[in-house]
Amino acid sequence: MTVSDKTSPVSEQAGRQGNAALLFLVVTAFINSMGIGLTTPVMPALLMEISAGDLAEASRWGGLALFAYAIMQFVFTPIIGALSDRFGRRPVLLLSLSAFALDMLILGFVGTIWGFILLRAFAGVFAATFSTSNAYIADVTPAEDRGKKFAMLGAAFGAGFVFGPAIGGALGDIDVRLPFFAGAALATANALYGYFVMRESLRLENRRPFSWRRANTVGTLLRLFRNPAVGPLLPVFFLATLSTWVYPTVWSYVAIQKFAWTEGQIGYSIAYYGVVAFVGQALVIQFLLPKLGVRHAIWIALLVEALALTGLGLATAVWMVYLMISAAILSVMQDPALRQEMSARISEDAQGELQGGLSALSSVAMILSPLIYMGLFTATADPESPIYLPGSPFFAAAAMSLFALIAYGWVTKRRRPAPGARG
């Protein structure tokens, strides 16, 4: 038996294995997001250093780097998802975690802007941790409970953003490169933990042969869109995801321009978002999602998100920023609720393909987000420009959330709820 075939039966031991798997995935999501969060507050400063430019110049390079990352993720995530359906979740997760550790380490030494962009592209190739973890959960969790488990994974991810940005901001005030070395150390520890602790979740009888047709990004998305069970929900997921990408894309730049915040202050604001998201995912959703039902949860989350994004665009004082961030305690329901509804409509041997397809849609959102949000920021952040409105990216994101709400209303009018989806 090979290392990747350490498969535990899911039948009688589903509950026990599910709990053990969830514990590992929670730790993985926490450490991985903490490593990402460490570097977020210092990105503008690092880009200004290696590009020898101002904030506007740094935002352009930051947008290009995010674009490169997203393009590679778009191309490779369905391939990774198909590989996980063939060989199991364990080897794919270990490969992704190891690549992330290497990327963080080299970023700590990078001295040229093109080197930085190449490293971001490399990271995008292996950015399958979250989608593979969701497929892992689908392997060991009954369909009706997956929304809560997806939310717990999101809560762990949010918890990492509580500590990561705060620590990264403090380290960045000392040296902008220290957070990258700290992130590399955390990612290495995560990969080692996974190697010694993680067991395979995908049973041999549920695996399917690797197919380049299925691993093709466009082909995967076309199959999902043609699937009458999940196809109508994909535009809702895409628009909702595109709206949330405004935060990692431009928040650091908007905070500097509007409020002249330091790396530490940016880190604390992102950490606060992590606290709110953690409470929302770990506590609020666990009680609200079963009581509200999937459909009502999605309605509420999208509406609250649209209002909060509008408020952030209008914010003129720090207290207003933190008030709007607090709304995330409800808006974080949208992702796990949508994933639960779609996961319940897909066969067990296609969960990796579904999660890979959703990650591909997230990649498209990432591709468009710098073009939309960075483009708006660059055009409106200069006080000498015809329109000075540095909060404009958040107004655009609010519109995306409203479009998602309208699309979901249209879908739910046309079809009945999914089996097991209350509402």
Image (cartoon, rainbow, N blue to C red):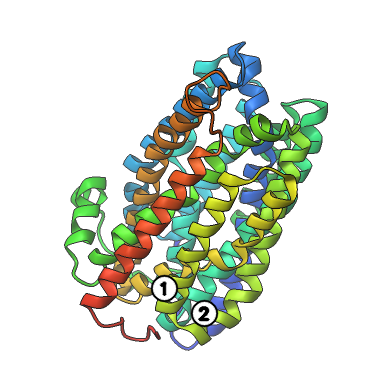
Label 2: element kind = helix
- Give the mark nearest the N terminus, 2 or 1: 2
Q: Quadrant of residue 171?
A: top right
Q: Residue at x 45, y 64 (%)?
A: 302
Q: Which image quarter holds the C terminus?
A: bottom left
Amino acid type of disc 2? Leu
Q: Residue at x 64, y 38 (%)?
A: 40
Judging depth in this view, the residue of 374 and 195 nearest the camera is 374
Viewer-nearest of labels 2 and 1? 2
Label 2 crowding class (10 Å Cα cut-off): few <14, some 14-19, many 20+?
many
Q: Are marks 2 and 1 in contact (CB under 8 Å)?
A: yes
**The one of 15 and 244 positioned closer to us in this rendering:** 244
Residue toward you, 150 or 105: 150
Residue 50 location, x and y as percent?
A: 62, 15
On the question of residue 344 being in view, the answer is yes
Q: Residue at x 72, y 30 (%)?
A: 260
Residue under label 1, please give it: 340
Percent position (x, y) of residue 420? 37, 86
The three-letter amino acid code for the residue at tag 1 is Gln
In the picture of the structure, the residue carrying the numbered disc 2 is 289
Q: Is residue 51 left or right of residue 229?
A: right
Position of residue 334 relative to residue 54, above or below, is: below
Examine the image and state in which quarter residue 55 appears: top right
Q: Is residue 121 visible?
A: no
**Which numbered disc covers residue 52?**
none
Reply above or below: 57 against 36.
above
